[in-house]
Amino acid sequence: TQLLEQSPQFLSIQEGENLTVYCNSSSVFSSLQWYRQEPGEGPVLLVTVVTGGEVKKLKRLTFQFGDARKDSSLHITAAQPGDTGLYLCGRGSTLGRLYFGRGTQLTVWP
Amino acid sequence: DTGVSQNPRHKITKRGQNVTFRCDPISEHNRLYWYRQTLGQGPEFLTYFQNEAQLEKSRLLSDRFSAERPKGSFSTLEIQRTEQGDSAMYLCASSATAQGGNTGELFFGEGSRLTVL
C-alpha cells in the first residue's frame, strides 16, 4: 500500500526546461525525504525536510515542504540529461520506518 | 566502510524453491530495512529492524517471508515456496537514528534481483 501520492508518474522533457514534481498525503508527515534512483542502483538521498514551510536548495533543485506538512514539491531549474532518474519521496516517522511513494520517472532529452 | 552490501546480486529459481538473501549494513548503523521493488515503481516496505529487534513487518507480507538480524549486524531475508509474483528487486538499506528518533538517511545496497521461473 502506497501512503503517498506522487505526480506526475512520468515526465519527459527537453534539456533546459523547468519542472516540478509533487508528493502528497492525507496525513501529516513527521519528516519527508526525497531520493533519486538511477537504473540498477539503490536510491540516494537528496534532502530531508522536517519543518512546515521549509525550503531547501541543492544547486538547481529546490525542495519545499508544505505549511501543514502534508505535501512537498521538488522543482528543477534548467534540467539536464544527468537529472534523468526515478524521483522518490519517502515518509519518515519517529518510529524510524520510511514508506515511499510510487515515484516520478523523469527523462531529460539532450 | 564500503557501504551496504547485498548478495547474491542475482538469483534465478524455480517456483516452489526457497531462497535467502543476505544484507551487510554499514557497521555503525543500528537500523536496517528491507524493501521490494518492481520495474518503474517505488520501493515497497517489507520490514525493518532496530538493532536485533524487528520493529515492523508489512501486513502485505505473506507468512512465506521471514527476516532475521540475529546479532544486530547482518540480516537475512528468506522467501519460502517462491511464486512467480515474488520476482522483483529486493533492496536493503541501513541508517543511523536521527534526532528525536526520526528516520535518518537511508543508505541502500545495490539490491538482489530475484527471478522465479
Image (tube, grey):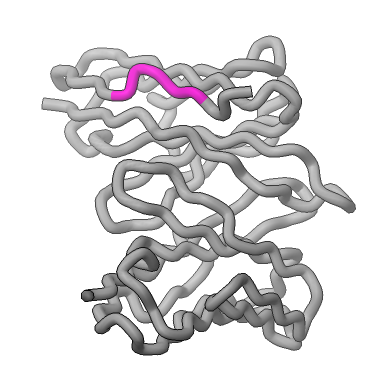
State the image coordinates of residue B114 (x, y, percent, origin top left).
Answer: 26, 28
**Is A97 situated above or below B96?**
below
**As rendered, which of B9 and A59 lies closer to the eye?**
A59
Q: Residue at x 10, y 26 (%)?
A: B117
User: Of all residues shown, which one is farthest toward the top?
Assistant: B71
Q: How many marks?
A: 0
- Magenta stretch secondary structure, dominant: strand
| Residue B75 located within the stretch drawn in magenta | no
Q: Residue at x 45, y 80 (%)?
A: A21
**Is B79 situated above or below A86?**
above
Question: Where's the C terminus of chain A, which quadrant?
Answer: bottom left
Q: Give left or right: position of B78 versus B108.
A: left
**As rendered, which of A3 and A68 lies closer to the eye?**
A68
Q: Quadrant of residue B48?
A: top right
Q: Residue at x 40, y 56 (%)?
A: B42
Q: Give left or right: position of B48 versus A80.
A: right
| Residue B7 located within the stretch drawn in magenta | yes
**Is A55 situated above or below A3?**
below
**As rendered, which of A53 and B46 lies closer to the eye?**
A53
Question: Where's the N terminus of chain A, which quadrant?
Answer: bottom left
Q: Which residues are magenta?
A: B5-9
